[in-house]
């Protein structure tokens, strides 16, 4: 019984993800208001490490790598890995087989953790060049 | 012993491959495994939920996601040390914290939409 519930939850999440990607292609989160603002930024006024990732994905879906990079460079770097992981997972749910799995050493995962935290701090600093990491800052003259 | 998946040379008492994390087979058929934890079926690895953890960290903007990444690191660290039971425990924690992060984010979104609805309704009654 529990397994069936999990399957439905996963199916629901993947479907929601698919709809979100389609919406991201059509609407630009920077201008349309079709997407909610980041709750962290809404509450605190600070950028979180994910701020700008929806706008970055919109730009990526339209092939603008430079604009995507300016919105959230961390997310542009992570996206291929995350996409591989999700594709592997989706394939597993459908066919029971996975894409080849890579073992990431524990030290790399810890480093990743530190990078995310440093990125979150740096993009909120009002100092050049750290402030270039704030969403869209690289696009401003 | 050599790993059947990636060919890396591992210490003879290792339960999983330090290179790729694959469960190592006993050298001789029927040879007893080191009893430090439960033995997984061959070919199965311990899931570290790293992708899930990163997704919830970035999109849910939550410290819970960071905790999940730390546990994901612990899964791989314990696998590298051959501590299968510890890796499975860390795997459970990584999954739990990813789900907490996801749950809080979904709850936050729901609250946001409810507040908007409340605002719209309030505006309607006001006029």
Image (cartoon, helix red, strand yellow):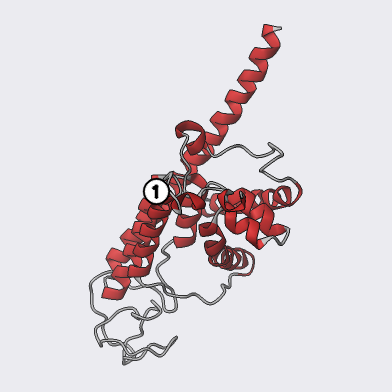
The 10 Å Cα crowd at callout 1, few under 14, some 14 to 19, many 20 or more, is some
**Does B102 sit above or below residue B21?**
above
Q: How many marks?
A: 1
* Residue B3 placement: quadrant: bottom left
Q: Position of residue A135 (x, y in %)?
A: 55, 48
x 34%, y 78%: residue: B16
x 43%, y 49%: residue: A120
Q: Is residue A124 left or right of residue B120?
A: left
For the residue pair B126 and A128, the one nearer the viewer reads as A128
Q: Is residue B30 left or right of residue B53?
A: left
**Does A115 sit above or below residue A102?**
above
> Residue most toward the right?
A26
**Does B119 sit above or below residue B69?**
above
x 33%, y 80%: residue: B18
Q: Is residue B80 left or right of residue A69?
A: left
For the residue pair B43 and B29, the one nearer the viewer reads as B43
Q: From where the camera sits, is residue A86 visible?
A: yes
Q: Position of residue A24 (x, y in %)?
A: 70, 49
**Does B44 sit above or below residue B62?**
below
Q: Position of residue A47 (x, y in %)?
A: 48, 43
Q: Chain of mark 1?
A: A
SS state under label 1:
helix
> Residue most toward the front?
A141
For the residue pair A67 and A116, the one nearer the viewer reads as A67
Q: Position of residue B60 (x, y in %)?
A: 49, 45
Q: From where the camera sits, is residue A12 visible?
A: no
What residue sits right under mark 1 in the picture? A121
């Amino acid at each position: 019984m529990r397994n069936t519930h999990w399957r439905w939850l996963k199916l629901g999440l993947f479907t929601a993800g698919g709809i979100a990607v389609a919406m991201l292609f059509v609407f630009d989160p920077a201008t349309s208001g079709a997407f909610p603002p980041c709750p962290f930024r809404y509450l605190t006024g600070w950028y979180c490490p994910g701020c700008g990732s929806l706008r970055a994905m919109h730009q990526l879906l339209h092939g603008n790598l430079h604009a995507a990079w300016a919105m959230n460079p961390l997310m542009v770097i992570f996206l291929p890995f995350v996409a591989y992981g999700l594709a592997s997972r989706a394939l597993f749910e459908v066919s029971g087989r996975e894409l080849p799995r890579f073992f990431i050493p524990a030290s790399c995962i810890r480093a990743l953790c530190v990078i995310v935290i440093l990125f979150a701090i740096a993009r909120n600093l009002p100092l050049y060049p750290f402030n270039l990491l704030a969403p869209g800052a690289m696009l401003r003259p | 012993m050599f790993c059947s998946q990636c060919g890396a040379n591992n210490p003879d008492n290792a339960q999983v491959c330090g290179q790729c994390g694959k469960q190592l087979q006993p050298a001789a058929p029927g040879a007893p495994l080191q009893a430090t934890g439960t033995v997984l079926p061959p070919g199965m690895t311990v899931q570290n939920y790293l992708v899930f953890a990163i997704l919830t960290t970035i999109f849910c903007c939550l410290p819970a996601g960071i905790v999940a990444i730390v546990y994901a690191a612990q899964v791989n660290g314990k696998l590298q040390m051959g501590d299968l039971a510890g890796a499975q425990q860390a795997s459970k924690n990584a999954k739990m914290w990813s789900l907490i992060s996801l749950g809080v984010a979904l709850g936050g979104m729901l609250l946001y939409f409810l507040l908007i609805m409340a605002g719209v309704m309030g505006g309607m009654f006001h006029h």
